[in-house]
Amino acid sequence: MYLLNPSWENPGIKLLFLTILLYSPLSSAKPGKFSCGASDGYAMYFDNGLIPEDTINIFRKDGISNGRTTLISDGEGGGDVLFYDANEEIKSAKAQGGKVIVMAGENHINWLVFYPEGTITIDSLHNSMKLTSYRNATGNGVLPKVHLFKSECNPQ
């Protein structure tokens, strides 16, 4: 069942995490903070008993029109991802138990977050201040989904 619920407790997820660190041509990002706004793109929701049956298991346009995300790099390969939830409360990836890795290349910075329940997120910020956000939350029992969104960001 590890493949169906890729939690941090799964040795395979830990191996993936270590492999990314060891074999990545990326380096730690410089310290910094970036603020990103509304996002749009595509998402696929999976059956959880609450979502209408005719909208599950298909990719459809989606987004967060009042979304706000703050990406933080500590300059040592770590950082945090802060975001406003549906209740307009600030949530922290680290405070929710997420393992955060921040790596930079020549033209971009990546924030990889592995959550205990199996959700994996990758936020990729290009030098043009365009953000691509990928989230695989198939292991999340409350709202299982996969999405690929884009948004605009600014340095803080």
Image (cartoon, helix red, strand yellow):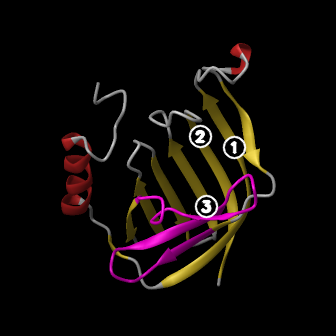
Mark 1–mark 2 Cα distance, whole angstroms, equals 8 Å
Q: Residues within 10 Å of mark 1 (few under 14, many from 20)?
A: some
Please identify, in this view, whether the residue under mark 3 or under mark 2 is nearer the observer.
Answer: 2
Which quadrant of the structure image shows residue 83?
Answer: bottom right
Q: Residue at x 62, y 70 (%)?
A: 128
Say which amino acid is labelled 1.
Gly
- Whether residue 95 is visible, yes or no, is yes
Task: Point out the frontmost of discs 1 and 2.
Answer: 2
Q: Earlier in the sequence, mark 1 or mark 2?
A: 1
Pointer 1 with pointer 2, Cβ within 8 A: yes
Extreme residue in the right direction:
65
Q: Residue at x 30, y 47 (%)?
A: 8
Residue 147: image tag: 2
Q: CA distance from mark 3 to mark 2?
A: 13 Å
Where residue 20 appears, as percent x and y from the top left, is 26, 56
SS for callout 1: strand
The image quadrant where one finds the N terminus is top left
Horizontal relation, residue 114 to residue 90: left or right: left
Q: Which span is picked out in magenta?
A: 70-98
Residue lying at 49% horizontally and 37% vertically, measured from the top left = 140
Amino acid type of the residue that numbered disc 2 sits on in the rendered structure: His
Asked whether, in this view, residue 42 is left or right of residue 108, the answer is right
Verify whether residue 19 appears in magenta.
no
Look at 48% across and 59% down and name the residue there. Answer: 96
Q: Which residue is mark 1?
A: 41
